């Protein structure tokens, strides 16, 4: 090859390389790995579990997606009526609608005061789009887009949980049986009541009622994921091994490795039921995949394995749009009057119960 031809060849290679760099809109670290750092807002109208009306159909038509976004309030109300019958505080003596999933075993709903009403829910204005297609659900496996059934053991644990925590709210029902009660002290309450962990799922990272902002900070050896809801922070260690099984953490122990431009995170070593979803156990294992698609978007996929709870693994994925918003402090126990109110209310009910017993009523 003569000098002119060599220069032309070199010039063509440099141009091709420059074009490839220009076309790569993925932010990168100095070491060449994708930079996942940023603030993301993952709120969405798309539910985790697929409404049964869509059966095994993973995708919405553009017309269906537009209708959901245009009729946002009606869609949220319909979804809440199925997923949380107490959302809008039914009248005393009311009962939840029939046909609820097995996750509501034992839930009486009688006289329940309810939780937040729909006004406070922040589901955003859009449905999830992955690879240019609108989605009916975040879950993709099983094929019906719904979590698989619980094992008999898990259903039994759930019945016990609801029997301990749900009953007539105007009566100290827990005094009618032996053993510790659900209002004996702060330690008797749930981790969420005590503000020890998030009210939403942190591992995997899923949308929740509000405060859906996530912050990622990355170095060559660590990736930190901050959850706005109750300020949960996870640290993913790049490389290494999990500790022995008897060493447990609120959000498990996370190890990451790169497969091309995707960070694969394997999380094990959970405390019992510390992840705020579905009654998971220490045998829980979660595998997540984070891929920065461009400067504005991160793709997040997850797999959940816990054979002591679910009859099969379940998977899902969705996009995380970057935001100019900030992660605000969630000071859960700053001036939190809920815990003393809960315990004081229980003492009042217990006093009334003992008076009834003493009077023979």
Image (cartoon, rainbow, N blue to C red):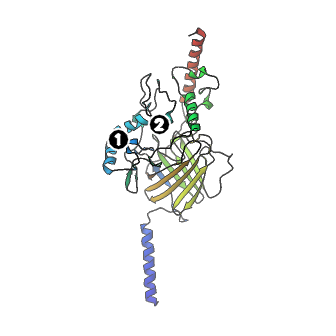
**Which residue is pictured at 64% across the width and 26% down the height?**
180
**Residue most extreme to the bottom:** 2
Residue 184 in the image, given as x and y percentages of width and height: 62, 26
Q: Nearer the viewer, residue 330 or 355?
A: 355
**Disc 1 element:** helix
Residue 225 in view in this figure: yes
Give the residue furthest to the top: 359
Check the image and report above or below for 352 versus 318. Answer: above
Query: Is 331 situated above or below 108?
Result: below
The image quadrant where one finds the C terminus is top right
Sequence order check, earlier mark of 1 and 2: 1
Q: How many marks?
A: 2
Instruction: Identify which residue is drawn at 37% across, 54% down.
Output: 133
Q: Residue at x 47, y 24 (%)?
A: 110
Q: Quadrant of residue 22?
A: bottom left
Q: Please determine whether, in this image, residue 116 is positioned above or below residue 301.
A: above
CA distance for labels 1 and 2: 24 Å
Q: Which residue is mark 2?
A: 101
Q: In the rendered structure, find residue 72 and report the number of the disc placed on it.
A: 1
């Amino acid at each position: 090859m003569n000098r002119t031809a060599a220069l032309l060849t070199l010039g063509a290679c440099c141009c091709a390389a420059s074009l490839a760099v220009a076309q790569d809109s993925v932010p990168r670290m100095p070491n060449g790995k994708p930079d996942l750092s940023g603030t993301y807002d993952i709120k969405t109208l798309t539910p985790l579990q697929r409404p049964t009306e869509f059966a095994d159909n993973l995708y919405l038509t553009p017309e269906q997606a537009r209708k959901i976004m245009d009729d946002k309030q009606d869609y949220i109300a319909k979804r809440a009526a199925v997923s949380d019958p107490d959302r809008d505080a039914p009248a005393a003596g009311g009962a939840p609608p029939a046909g609820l999933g097995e996750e509501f075993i034992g839930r009486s709903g009688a006289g329940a005061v309810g939780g937040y009403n729909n006004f406070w829910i922040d589901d955003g204005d859009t449905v999830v789009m992955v690879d240019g297609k609108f989605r009916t659900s975040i879950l993709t496996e099983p094929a019906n887009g719904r979590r698989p059934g619980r094992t008999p053991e898990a259903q039994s644990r759930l019945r016990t949980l609801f029997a301990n925590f749900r009953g007539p709210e105007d009566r100290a029902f827990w005094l009618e049986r032996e053993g510790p009660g659900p209002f004996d002290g702060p330690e008797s309450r749930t981790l969420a009541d005590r503000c020890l962990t998030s009210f939403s799922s942190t591992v995997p990272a899923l949308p929740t009622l509000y405060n859906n902002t996530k912050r990622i900070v990355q170095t060559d050896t660590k990736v930190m994921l901050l959850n706005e809801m109750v300020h949960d922070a996870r640290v993913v260690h790049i490389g290494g091994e999990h500790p022995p099984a008897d060493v447990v953490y609120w959000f498990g122990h996370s190890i990451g490795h790169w497969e091309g431009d995707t960070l694969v995170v394997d999380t094990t070593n959970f405390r019992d039921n510390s992840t705020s979803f579905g009654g998971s156990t220490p045998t829980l294992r979660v595998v997540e995949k984070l891929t920065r698609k461009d400067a504005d978007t991160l793709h997040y996929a997850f797999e959940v394995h816990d054979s002591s709870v679910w009859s099969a693994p379940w998977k899902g994925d969705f996009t995380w749009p970057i935001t100019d918003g900030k992660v605000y402090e969630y000071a859960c126990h700053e001036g939190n009057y809920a815990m003393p109110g809960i315990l004081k209310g229980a003492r009042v009910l217990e006093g009334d119960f003992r008076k009834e017993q003493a009077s023979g009523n």
